[in-house]
Amino acid sequence: MEKPLTYKQAKRKYLKTLEQYVPIVARVHGDNHPEFHDVHDLFDTVSQKIKAAGPDKPELEDEFTRLRAITGNYTVPADVCESYAAVYTMLAELDRAYHA
């Protein structure tokens, strides 16, 4: 079994990819999944806080709580592409690592 990522590992592994994917997924799926616009806004806040914190761990409890609520605990809708699913998977892993 693979060892879970630490917050720093998850940040390093997923942040840049999420910064690329989230705006594209919002543009492609936002009309059919308007909740993804909220995901986009929250992710932008998460990204900004992570960058502002530098090597320190920022306060992201509210953002992750809201992301879990909006996404149904990162449940991927049946009618979306692999990139949408990948975003939810990466956000869930970042959330898990943050709270570990």
Image (cartoon, rainbow, N blue to C red):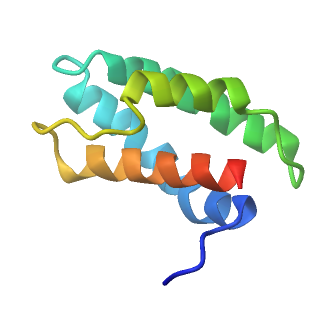
Q: Position of residue 74 (x, y in %)?
A: 39, 39
Drawn side of residue 52 relative to residue 35, left or right: right
Image quadrant holding the C terminus, namely bottom right
Query: In the displayed image of the protein, which residue is found farthest to the front?
Result: 1
Total number of numbered discs in the rendering: 0
Q: Position of residue 90 (x, y in %)?
A: 46, 53
Q: Position of residue 62 (x, y in %)?
A: 68, 23
Query: In the displayed image of the protein, which residue is found farthest to the right?
Result: 56
Q: Position of residue 6 (x, y in %)?
A: 70, 65
- Residue 91 appears in the picture as rendered: yes
Drawn side of residue 46 relative to residue 16, left or right: right
| Quarter assignment of residue 8 | bottom right
Drawn side of residue 8 relative to residue 2, left or right: right
Query: In the displayed image of the protein, which residue is found farthest to the bottom?
Result: 1
Q: Is residue 96 above or below residue 58?
A: below
Front position in the image: 54 or 67: 67
- Residue 40 appears in the picture as rendered: no
Front position in the image: 66 or 13: 66
Drawn side of residue 70 relative to residue 32, left or right: right
Question: At 23% across and 21% down in the image, what residue appears?
Answer: 33
Q: Is residue 35 above or below residue 20?
A: above
Question: At 71% across and 58% down in the image, what residue appears?
Answer: 7
Question: At 38% across and 19% down in the image, what residue appears?
Answer: 37
